[in-house]
Amino acid sequence: MAGRKGLTFYQKKKKLNMVLIREILSWIFWIFASILLAVVTVFCVGMKTSVIGSSMEPSLYNGQEIFLNRLIYKVTSPKEGDVVVFLPNGNEKSHYYVKRVVGVPGDRLYIKNGILYVNDESVEEYFNDKIAEPGLLENEVALEEDEYFVIGDNCNSSEDSRSANIGTIKKSYIIGKAWMKMASGDSDMGLIE
């Protein structure tokens, strides 16, 4: 027989290159691992919310979206100057409040002549004006363990720890630390300071 014509099932088999197969499987694994890590990070650590009201101007504006880190305060505690998101009195039905921490456990706070004093030292760098209404800080307040005092940067247009219905904030009421803001109005996108 000179040559075969028609269908034949005895064609030469191509050998698969094992190095190529390993490379493809490696790429598939790393793509899947990256997607899984991104999903876990967003759902466990990150969260997005919006600022309600003008209490944080000029740092943050009404309706501006912010991202927060929900994991950080499971490892560390809030520090003075942190912008935190919390539920007042742990009320799950309330909207999220966004305020700046001005007092941490062990601090003594009061307001005199429109100026906030923490441990007898004036704190003015966070506020855009003198504080008109001292509220609970008319008299000195000593923070106990697991108590934080928060005030909005726009202190004369803020419902915060000075109000009796909010008062000091427990760590368990804090949802997370605000760390990034989206562009809105006069404010650019960037890290929250």
Image (spheres, rainbow, N blue to C red):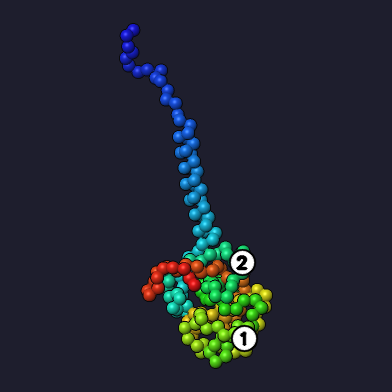
Relative to 175, does residue 55 appear above or below in the rendering?
below
Marking on residue 152: none
Residue 28 image point, x, y percent = 47, 42
Expressed as whole percent of the image width and height from the top left, the position of residue 98 reads 51, 74
Tell which circle, 1 or 2, labels the residue nearer the N-terminal end. Answer: 2
- 79 or 9, nearer to the observer: 79
Which of the 4 image quadrants contains residue 106?
A: bottom right
- Give how far apart the Cα atoms at labels 1 and 2 are: 26 Å
Rendered location of residue 95, percent (x, y): 51, 73
Q: Residue at x 47, y 42 (%)?
A: 27
Residue 137: tell me if it is visible: no
Secondary structure of the residue carrying tag 2 is: loop
Residue 146 horizontal side relative to residue 52, left or right: right
Outermost residue, top side:
1
Q: Which residue is mark 1?
A: 120
Counting other residues with Cα less than 10 Å from the Cα at mark 2, is it few (<14), some (14-19), or many (20 or more)?
few
Q: Nearer the viewer, mark 1 or mark 2?
A: 1
Q: Secondary structure at mark 1?
A: loop
| Residue 102 quadrant | bottom right
Q: Which disc, if any, is residue 76?
A: 2
User: Residue 167, relative to residue 29: is it above or below?
Assistant: below
Write down the quadrant of residue 84 in the picture.
bottom right
State the quadrant of the N terminus: top left
Count of numbered circles on the image: 2
Image spot of residue 172 (x, y percent): 62, 70
Most distant residue in the front direction: 121
Q: Residue at x 57, y 63 (%)?
A: 71
Q: Which residue is more in the foreground, 33 or 164? A: 33
Q: Amino acid at mark 2?
A: Thr
